[in-house]
Amino acid sequence: MTSNRPYLLRALYEWINDNNLTPYILVDATQPDVVVPASTVKDGKVVLNIAMRAVEALELGNEALSFKARFGGVSQFLYVPVAAVLAIYAQETGQGMMLPADEAAAEEEGLDAYEPDPHSGALDGDPEDPPKPPAPGKGAHLRIVK
């Protein structure tokens, strides 16, 4: 089966626009083929405003998002593979969705889409180490849309 990620992106983009809100995407800028201004990347991620009033020639394709946007007054072309989009949400409310793992990409890499990578270090830690509490600050601003 094809990936459901581009369909989810388009549906949520339309839903956010229909409610007169501003769609933002969270992008993993470390993914291959991502073209975004380096000055916008922080900790390997970038948040992009993809509202109709903020971009030109937006294309939400099955393989990638592409558009022109202005940064510091200079128009630049951006290219974001769908696999690099981590979330889409409304800037005003935080409502949106963290996108699920892409099953097709995981299968190509020989991984189960619902199982963590055993080499990521995210599995069982030392049982003697207590879990660390979350860092203080702003809480999560994304909400799952059901």
Image: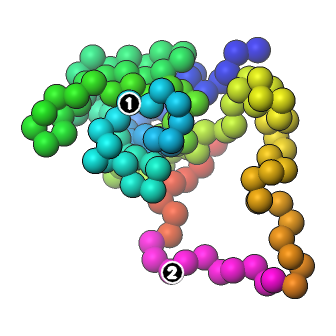
Disc 1 secondary structure class: loop
Kind of residue sitting beneath label 1: Val
Q: Magenta segment: does it hold 59?
A: no
Residue at 28%, 47% (x, y): give it.
39
130 magenta-colored: yes
Is 130 rendered above or below residue 80? below
**Residue 43 located left or right of residue 109:** left
The answer to whether residue 17 is visible is: no
The one of 138 and 27 positioned closer to us in this rendering? 27
Residue under pointer 1: 35
**Outermost residue toward the right in this view:** 127
Residue depth check, mark 1 versus mark 2: number of the one nearer the observer: 1
Q: Nearer the viewer, residue 130 or 1?
A: 130
Q: Which mark is residue 81?
A: none
Q: Which residues are magenta?
A: 129-138
Residue 38 point in image, percent of width and height = 32, 43
**Image position of 68 with respect to 85: above or below:** above
Name the amino acid type tagged 2: Pro
Q: Which mark is residue 136?
A: 2
Q: Position of residue 30 (x, y in %)?
A: 50, 41
Quadrant of the rendering where the C terminus is positioned: top right
Nearer-N-terminus badge (1/2)? 1
